[in-house]
Amino acid sequence: VIHQENYLKVFLTDGDIPIDNSASERAVRTFCIGKKNWMFHNTAKGARASALVYSISETAKLNNLRPYYYFRYILTELPKCCDEKGNIDPAKLDQLMPWAEEIPEECRKPRRS
């Protein structure tokens, strides 16, 4: 801890550096709250499925989408992207990505006035 004063005061010289870590703590709060639910994942496949859903949800939030409506949208649209054998062409997935312009307005968070 000795000789760390310059590093602790760096936020004084760079306005982009936050004075605290509140934003980081808010970002991981939902993850920490959910971990009690995850102790029941007794298989690697179950844990992988949960990680996938969590990843999609958090990516939707980062792209200013409402996760419930986004999940409803992609679960409705994914079957339409399948061929006769149930395979999906990866190029068709671009329009379902959270950053795609084709995402319906109902999935987007309303902008604050």
Image: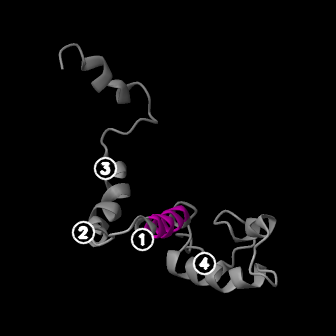
Q: Position of residue 86 (x, y in %)?
A: 74, 81
Q: Residues within 10 Å of mark 4 (few under 14, many from 20)?
A: some
Residue type highlighted by circle 1: Gly
Mark 2 sits on what residue?
36
How many angstroms separate mark 3 from mark 2 (CA)? 22 Å
Mark 3 sits on what residue?
22
The single residue placed furthest to the top in the displayed view is 3
How many angstroms separate mark 4 from mark 2 (CA)? 28 Å
The answer to if 30 sits in the magenta stretch is no
The residue tagged with tag 3: helix, strand or loop?
helix
Mark 4 sits on what residue?
107
Which tag, 4 or 3, sits closer to the chain's start?
Answer: 3
Q: Which residues are magenta?
A: 48-59
Q: Which mark is drawn over residue 46? A: 1
Looking at the image, which is closer to me, 40 or 17? 40
The residue tagged with tag 1: helix, strand or loop?
helix
For the stretch drawn in magenta, the main secondary structure is helix
Which tag, 4 or 2, sits closer to the chain's start?
Answer: 2
Given this view, does label 3 or label 2 mark the residue nearer the observer? 2
Q: Which mark is drawn over residue 27? A: none
Residue type highlighted by circle 3: Ser
